[in-house]
Amino acid sequence: MRQSAARPADVDGRMDPEPVLDPLALLASPGPNGPALLSVLHSLGPEEIPGLVECLVHHRVDGLAWRALGGLPGAETDTWLRATLRRACEAPNFFSTFLKKNLVKN
């Protein structure tokens, strides 16, 4: 299959990359992505935030996520998410205790 048939090209022949819409990928990304991250975080409902935190812990990118959130205005991000990631960075065993008490149901 020809490359031009596999992916549509822009008018000048360059490929337009797909925007990253995965909050986990944006929070773990080492580069600046403030506007995209804010947009994706605003689209999440309050019931989706604990699952996002659980994924961040599972993939061990909670420190990267805290650094990404630290560069955003505090008033524009989820307060619970921000506080949870901050506590995790301050107390290394916070997440394992938190998940056992709050998210894991027996």
Image (cartoon, rainbow, N blue to C red):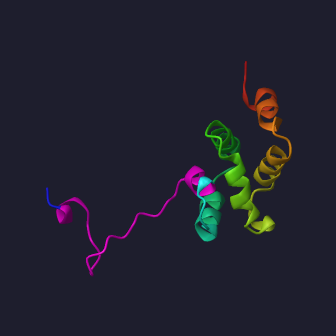
Quarter of the figure that contains the N terminus: bottom left
Q: Residue shown at 81%/34% (left/top)? A: 98
**Helix, strand or loop: magenta stretch:** loop
Task: Tell me which residue sits at (41%, 63%) in the image.
Answer: 18
Relative to 14, 80 lies left or right: right
Depth order, front residue of 46/6: 6
Percent position of residue 96, x then y: 77, 31
**Residue placed farthest to the left in the image?**
1
Q: What is the magenta range? A: 3-27
User: Of residues 75 and 17, which is closer to you in this image?
Assistant: 17
The location of residue 75, given as percent across then percent down, is 80, 67
Residue at the outermost top position: 106
The C terminus, quarter of image: top right
**From the viewer's perspective, is residue 86 above or below residue 9?**
above
Left or right side of 10 for 59: right
Quadrant of residue 3 within the rendered picture: bottom left
Q: Is residue 7 above or below residue 14?
A: above
